[in-house]
Each structure stands twice: as structure tokens, then as C-alpha cells.
Amino acid sequence: MSWWTSVLGGALGYMIGGPLGAMLGVAFAGNFSKGKSNFRGSPKDYQPGDKQRVQAAFFSSVFSVMGYIAKVDGKVSKSEILLAQQVMHHMQLSEDMQKVAKELFNQGKAKDFNLDEVLEQFRSESHRRTHLVRMFLEIQIQATYADGILDDKEHEALKYIAQKLHFPIYELKSLIQQFSATYNNQPTVEDAYVILGADKSLTNKELKRAYRRLLAQHHPDKLVAKGLPEEMIKIANEKTQKIISAYELIKKNRGMR
């Protein structure tokens, strides 16, 4: 049974509890009738750390925090709304899933949105899985670039979010640089090193090791196993492809086999 089937009608949302459960409950209550729910589970079926529970928490956190970041500069631009819609489309969400994602996005824009509580619960629900937290931040970074600019308020918001998730700021800086490099349609060799988070002084052997480590962090199957919703696997696949392309560009530049 998928996490989406389990959460229909808001049942799993209420079982998760906390701000994430409440937001899921509101999102579903506003878009589905009670008769549409076919949930037959019980609280004991979804203990902390359960894959479906983590996936539901990731989904609700991603879109609500995306809404918060969109408004952090005091307004929500058309490009930021479009970006959220593009992410939903990119994930090939069903019409029902898009309704819930949009509602979560709107809740994140609200004045009473409690960012701290949401981040604390997400961190707890994900059992501090670093790979999941990294993917979460990469999606938020993508959201900040919706208008092509990462302004100071957005940057500070990202730093604050990373700190709350106990994610190293120096790694956040690296993620921002990596995304900026991939923002170019035709990355240069210099961009390729940034994407891999590697220094030009690395030997071929060291470079290969860094490449494999980065590839492992973004392996779609591993991320899904840790709690990434299946709907986001396309984003993970594209990130993996960019890493591979960057490595191939460097290999060609170095004359590596």
C-alpha cells in the first residue's frame, strides 16, 4: 500500500499528529469528501520511522516550507507560484495530489505558519536521515531560484532552515553553489567541479571517490528506501544525471578513460 492510499481522507495525517498531521488533515478535508477515503489502517500500522509515515511527512514539509520561502521577502511572485506548480507537474502528481500540494503551499504562506514546529517534526519523523534532509534542502534551494535570484532574505531563510535541521551551513553553501552551477544550460568544466563539490587539485583517484560518494547520496532507490516519496524519484534521477554529466565533462577535460 502506498503512502498516498494510506493518507486518503486524512487518516494518516491525524495518526502522525503534530503540525504536519494537522496540515495534512486540513489539506485533505478541504479537497476530499469523507466518502472518498478507503483507509482501513490503525495507529499501530504507522509507527515513527515507518516508510509511509516518513514519505507523508516529507511531502507535507516540502510544499508547506516552499510556501513559507516564497513569501519570506514579503510577497509571492508569479514565478514562485509557477515554480511550485512546475515542481508538482515535474513530479507527475495526480490531480488529487496537486490539490493537496497546493493547499500545503498555501498553508506555508499563512502568517500563522509555525516554521520551527514543522522543521522539528520533519527532522524527528525523518529520523535525522541526512540524505533525506539534503534532498529536502535541494528542493527548497530550487524554489528560491524561481525568479532567477537568491536574495538576502531567502538566503537567510535557507540558513535558518538548515540550522534547525542540524544540517551544516558549509554543506548548504555547497548545495547552493552546485545548484547555481547546474542552472546553466551548458555547464562549463569549472561548473562541473562545483557540481561535484570537488577541487581541481584532486587526483583522478580522489575525484572518482568524490564522484561516487555524491552519486550514492542521490541514488533514487536508496532515497526512496529512506522515505523519499516515489513521486519525487524523477527529481532524484535528474540530479543523478547532472552529477554523471559533470563527471564525464571533467573526465574528458582531464583525458581520463
Image (cartoon, grey):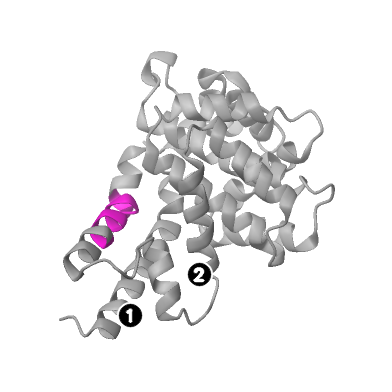
Residue 59, given in percent of the width and then of the height, sits at 53, 40
- For the point 37% across and 19% down, the residue is 45
- For the point 24% across and 65% down, the residue is 207
Asked whether the beta carbons under mark 1 and mark 2 sit within 8 Å of each other, the answer is no
Q: CA distance from mark 1 to mark 2?
A: 13 Å
The residue to which callout 2 is attached is 181
Q: Secondary structure at mark 1?
A: helix
Majority secondary structure in the magenta region: helix
Residue 130, quarter of the rendered image = top left
Q: Secondary structure at mark 2?
A: helix
Q: What's the amino acid at mark 1?
A: Leu
Residue 69, given in percent of the width and then of the height, sits at 70, 46
Q: Toward the viewer: 15 or 219? A: 219
Q: Which residues are magenta?
A: 211-221
Residue 20 appears anywhere in the view? yes
Q: What's the amino acid at mark 2?
A: Ala
Residue 120, given in percent of the width and then of the height, sits at 55, 25
- For the point 52% across and 80% down, the residue is 185
The residue to which callout 1 is attached is 249
The crowding category of the residue bearing disc 2, from other C-alpha atoms within 10 Å (few below 14, some 14 to 19, many at least 20), is some
In the rendered image, the quadrant that contains the C terminus is bottom left
